[in-house]
Image (spheres, rainbow, N blue to C red):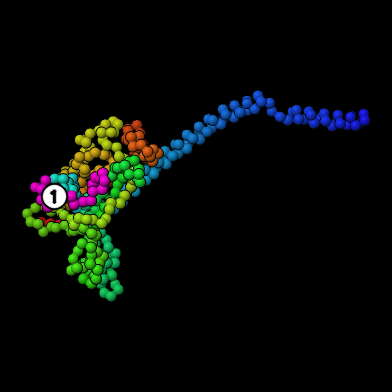
Amino acid sequence: MNILRWLLSTQLKPSHKQNKNSGFTLIELLVAMLIAFLVITPLLSFMISILNTDGQEQAKANSEQEIKAALDYITRDLQQAIYIYDATGIACLSGTVDTNTCPSASTNQLPSPTNGVPVLVFWKRELVNQAITITGTQKDDTFVYSLVAYYLIQDTSTTWSKAARIARWEIKDGVPNTAATVTCSGFTATDKYLPCPDKGFKPFDLSQKGITLQAKMNSWTGGGAYSQDPVVLVDFIDQTTIAQETPTVTAASITCPAPTGLVFQRVPSTIVRRGFYACVNSVGADNRSAVEVYLRGNAQARLIQNDETKVRYAQSKSSYFPSGNIKVQGSSFIFTK
């Protein structure tokens, strides 16, 4: 019996000693947790700061890229322009001036998207591929005239951002084809086209005598009931009004270039937002139109998407509002006496 007790005691003593030394006291655990908290918290703050900065820089980069892409697209469009409407011309087409200035355009000839302001309106030559039959199956390309309008839109739509957006609208002519068998919508059966003109399209009329080219173009009237709707080109355009900017600016301080012999009109004439506007010379000495287009994006609207009042332009946050401008002269022109 004594031997058994001795064996048990010798075996149990090391076990008790090991168990006693293998654990942590409550104080030790609390100290470890405090140290971990002091180390991890700054690291987490640092990581969150890095993520926020990365998100901000990515928003700025995206806005800069989209502004550049939009300007490139508008440039290619305007390079084919044969006539660009200035502020007076757009007012004529919109039916917002008296009939003495625009005798043939007493009503709005352009679509009216909700809270949309027309900024660029012009005629261009539109390429139509393989539209003319030469002989048999041989076909060739041709050009038709089209009317294009760019709008600055800022509304409460939940589909788009709280900033503004640019939308593009276009209607174009058809290609006359005596062999066409389909009657085009809005045209008589004797009008043969393939492809058909867009619904509501009417060509401009240069046959009027005794008036200037501008007066002839300003008196254009469309067929109405257009089937084409403005299509958004780019979102996240600065929606800030000039009265909301910090520091506040005035419309009079936003001027257009004044080169010798040319008269540029600011469009819109009564400028409200600097996110998208233009300076237009409809007819130069060589009958070509010229334009300078200005864009300003809004990267803040990518980060704060539920409050328009928090994404307005301020000089202290100008890096969030990338801007750009282009100068374009139409490659074609209208000759008229």
Above or below, 5 against 59 in this view is above
Q: Residue at x 26, y 74 (%)?
A: 135
Q: Nearer the viewer, residue 136 or 261?
A: 136
| Left or right: residue 204 compared with residue 233 | left
Three-letter code for the amino acid on which mark 1 is drawn: Ser
The spot of residue 101 in percent (x, y) is: 10, 47
| The C terminus sits in image quarter | bottom left
Residue 293 visible here? no
Q: Residue at x 28, y 75 (%)?
A: 136
Q: Nearer the viewer, residue 241 or 138?
A: 241
| Left or right: residue 298 compared with residue 119 | right
Q: Quadrant of residue 221?
A: bottom left
Q: Nearer the viewer, residue 308 or 167?
A: 308
The spot of residue 224 in percent (x, y) is: 20, 55
Above or below, 225 against 20 in this view is below
| The N terminus sits in image quarter | top right
Q: Residue at x 24, y 71 (%)?
A: 181
Q: Nearer the viewer, residue 116 or 147?
A: 116
Residue 134 visible here? yes
Q: Residue furthest bottom?
A: 136
Asked whether 169 falls inside the magenta stretch, the response is no
- At mark 1, the secondary structure is loop
Q: Which residues are magenta?
A: 98-118
Asked whether 110 falls inside the magenta stretch, the response is yes
Q: Residue at x 24, y 38 (%)?
A: 272
The spot of residue 200 in percent (x, y) is: 21, 58
Q: Which residue is mark 1?
A: 106
